[in-house]
Amino acid sequence: MSESNDDIFKFPCEYPIKVFGLNQPDLKDTICSIVENYVGKLHENQFSIKNSSKGKYVSITIRIIATSRKQLDSINEDLQKCPLVSYLL
């Protein structure tokens, strides 16, 4: 018996969003703003930032409490549309 994609998550649940982009001054604020549209104000302890070894790229991980598959899909869609985002996991 196989599970559908909706059955994978039991909402609400903790969900990490990982975004990669070029190291630009507006990257963190832009990514946080997009996510905050769906989850409310983020706290400093909800995200971590890591620079690549040469500093050209930045990895931002944001931990949220996801409430629905639709919420996750909307966040991912908006992040994919963002020109500052190179990759999204």
Image: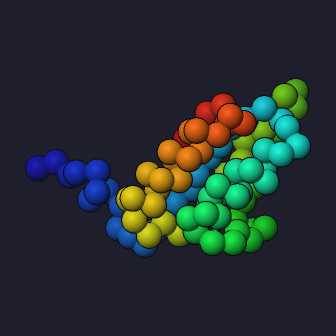
Q: Which colour scheme is used?
A: rainbow
On screen, residue 32 versus residue 11, left or right, reads: right
On screen, residue 59 versus residue 76, left or right, reads: right
Image quadrant holding the C terminus, namely top right
Q: Quadrant of residue 34?
A: bottom right
Q: Quadrant of residue 29?
A: bottom right
Residue 52 appears in the figure: no
Vertically, is 77 above or below 13? above
Rendering coords of residue 78 (x, y %): 56, 47
Rendering coords of residue 76 (x, y %): 51, 47
On screen, residue 66 versus residue 1, left or right, reads: right
Vertically, is 26 above or below 29? above
The number of numbered badges drawn on the structure is 0
Residue 39 appears in the figure: yes
- Viewer-side residue, 4 vs 29: 29
Looking at the image, which residue is at 56% across and 39% down? 80
Looking at the image, which residue is at 44% across and 51% down? 73
Rendering coords of residue 44 (x, y %): 78, 67
Rendering coords of residue 7 (x, y %): 26, 59
- Viewer-side residue, 44 vs 36: 36
- Viewer-side residue, 77 vs 14: 77
Residue at the outermost left position: 1
Looking at the image, which residue is at 38% across and 59% down? 69
Looking at the image, which residue is at 78% across and 38% down? 58
